Image: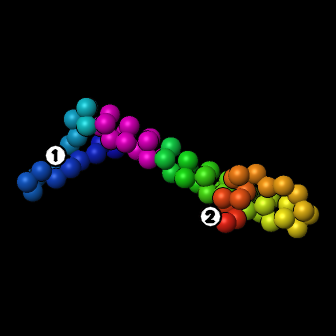
Amino acid sequence: MPRHHNINGNIVPFTAEEEAARDAEEAQAAIDSQARKDAEDARKANKISGKEKLKAGEALTDAEVEALFG
C-alpha cells in the first residue's frame, strides 16, 4: 500500500525517493529498538549475576558493579 503525506492540506503520494528514505528510517528504528532491548536485557542479567556473586563472595565484573550500583 503506497504511503501518502499531507502537503498544504493536499494528500500526496510519496515519491520513490521518499519511500526509500522512509523504509530506511523504519529499518533503523527497528535496529535501534532492538539495541535498546538488548542493552536492557544485558543490564538485568548483570544485576542478577552480580547479586548471586555477592551472596557467594565472588568477584564482580565492571558491568555487574555498574548494574548494581549505578
Which class describes the residues within 10 Å of circle 2: few (<14), some (14-19), or many (20+)?
few
The majority secondary structure of the magenta stretch comes to helix
Q: Which residues are magenta?
A: 19-30
Disc 2 residue type (three-letter): Gly
Marking on residue 12: 1
Q: Secondary structure at mark 2?
A: loop
CA distance for labels 2 and 1: 49 Å
Q: Find residue 21 and report its horizontal and vertical position in percent.
A: 31, 36
Image coordinates for residue 33, horizontal then vertical, percent: 51, 51
Who is closer to the viewer here, 66 or 37? 66
Residue at 28% over, 45% down: 3
Determine the residue located farthest toward the left in the rendered image.
8
Residue in the image at 61% along x and 57% along y: 40
Query: Residue 56's image quarter?
Result: bottom right
Q: Can you give x and y, in whole percent of width and height, for residue 43 in the image? A: 66, 57
Kindly identify the amino acid type of the residue bearing the numbered disc 1.
Val
* Element type at mark 1: strand
Circle nearer the viewer, 2 or 1: 2
User: Foreground: 58 or 43?
Assistant: 58
Q: Which residue carries the number 2 mark?
A: 70
Precedes in sequence: disc 2 or disc 1:
1
Q: Please give the label number shown on residue 46.
A: none
Query: Is residue 58 among the parts visible in the rendering?
Result: yes
Residue plotted at (88% across, 57% down): 58
Q: Within 10 Å of the Cα at label 1, are there few (<14), some (14-19), or many (20+) other Cα atoms?
A: few
Magenta region includes residue 24: yes
> Which quadrant would the N terminus be assigned to in this image?
top left
